[in-house]
Amino acid sequence: MNRLSLLCGFLLVALVLAAQVTMAAEREALTLRRPVGVSMQGLIWQGAGAPRQATAGDDSPAMSVNLSTVDTDLYTGYENAIYAADELNVFVAYKRFLSDPSLGGYLPAELRVAKSSDSGRTWTITVVDADAIESGDSIENSVSIDGDRGSTIYVAYHVRSSGLFVDMKLKVAKSTDGGSTWTTQTVADGYTGDQNSIRVLSANAAVISAHANGPAEGIHAFITSDGGARWSDTLVAGGLGNGFYTSVAAADTRSIWVSFYNSLFPDHTDMNAGTRLSGGAWKTVVVEGMPSDSNLTGLASSITVASNGTVFAAYEADTASGNFVIAASTTDGTRWDLERVQRDDIIGWNTAIHESNGTLYLSYWRLPIGGKGLAMFAMSSDNGATWTPFTVPDSRFVQPYIDSTAPSNFMQFESYQTVDPFTFQQPILRVARIGG
């Protein structure tokens, strides 16, 4: 899609588009800010291969999909993130604003966690933090969730009370009893956390990747090994505008990967990945993109480490030859194989990639020309060489607030916010159970 501007860190893109009007008219509808930043960082090193064509059919295969409504309260379901401890126990963390977020500004909000103990059929909701204020009219990937596959769950989330960087906070909510009770703490007070991702390695060990603004701008990694009593802060890659659309994956605290977007236009609009070396330093690589490249490559990134050690990253690439969801893979951290999962005029926005017993699962957002917003899901059973996408069948308009989790090959879950397809009001948070 054509971006409307690249002005000092914010990108205005049409979001809510009516099915009854042309695409040109749709792009003048309600907009959300999409941070992309600007950067002065130079190219670190290039290890990308040329994209190979992959299976990306437009028709959905037959899949077992069951939808459930999680939360219907007014202004609910923003920035949602989902985690499944197993096939039964599923958690969705999200923001619920206390006034209309489309009006813009920094609005009072709640951090909520919805829990299901029956594979997403029914849900109970807990207000974890009643004072989780943030900007209401942007997609910031500001909430992330993960757990130890037992009774411990961590939620990383962003709080920001004004346009000042000093008013930014990266916070963590933690439960050690399967979501019955929660405690909260501030990990970084000021400048940090507007985009974040969390990976839990054990009840006591977790890592957060987060974007920071101001004097320490870039992508940061926060690591704890004592259950969150202390968090170390390491700069992965600095530079004005660097570190947007971050994601983190890890096998243990000595093997951590992050993905992120470097956005200095025109010097950089590229997809990056970094790995933590044994001494604690970071080595970063450009997965796709070249200096002075007009393509926007690396938006909405997600990364995972498969059980065989292969690293997979998914992201959006807006290029002169079309807009794609890309799945990249590497076995050595240097050369990346790139596969096109699906193409459309507006596609990607929030990707999430997971692996379970050799099968890859990928979720993302799609807006077909003249159609409504869709929650997409794609699968690959050949190590990412080919992909089969399908559409989650929802009658409402799906917003780009979307995430997924894959506790097993038998069952996966995708969370997403929907609005009425005609009025674009009445947000509802839903979860699709895929398989099972």
Image (tube, rainbow, N blue to C red):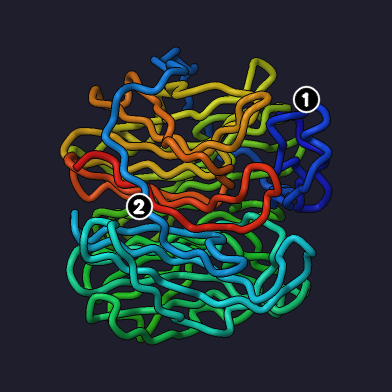
Q: Residue at x 34, y 54 (%)?
A: 256
Judging depth in this view, the residue of 100 and 238 nearest the camera is 100
Q: Which residue is mark 2?
A: 249
**Quadrant of image for the N terminus:** top right
Whole-percent x and y of residue 128? 44, 81
Q: Amino acid at mark 2?
A: Ala
Q: Is residue 283 visible?
A: no
Q: Residue at x 32, y 68 (%)?
A: 115
Question: Which sits in the foreground, 220 or 354?
Answer: 354
Out of 302 and 111, give the one closest to the viewer.
Answer: 111
Identify the mark at residue 36; answer none if there is no mark: none
Nearer the N terminus, badge 1 or badge 2?
A: 1
Q: Are marks 1 and 2 in contact (CB under 8 Å)?
A: no
Query: Judging from the image, what secondary structure is the residue with disc 2 in?
Result: strand
Q: Is residue 343 visible?
A: yes
**Who's the residue at 20% across and 63% down the image?**
149
Kind of residue at badge 1 = Thr
**Regarding mark 1 in the picture, which secondary structure is present there?**
loop
Callout count: 2
* Residue 104 placement, left or right of 190: right
| Mark 1–mark 2 distance (CA, rounded to whole Å) | 40 Å
- Residue lying farthest to the top in this orientation: 53
Vertical position of residue 286 compared to residue 420: above or below: above
The x and y percentages for residue 337 are: 40, 23
- Image coordinates of residue 359 in percent, x first then y, are 23, 33
Estimate the x, y position of residue 58 in percent, counting from the top left.
47, 18
Task: Name the residue at 66% across, 79% down.
Answer: 108
Residue count near mark 1 (Cα–Cα under 10 Å), binned few <14, some 14–19, many ≥20: few
Name the residue beneath numbered marker 1: 22
Quadrant of image for the C terminus: top left
Drawn side of residue 104 relative to residue 62, left or right: right
How crowded is the residue under tag 2: few (<14 C-alpha within 10 Å), some, or many (20+)? many
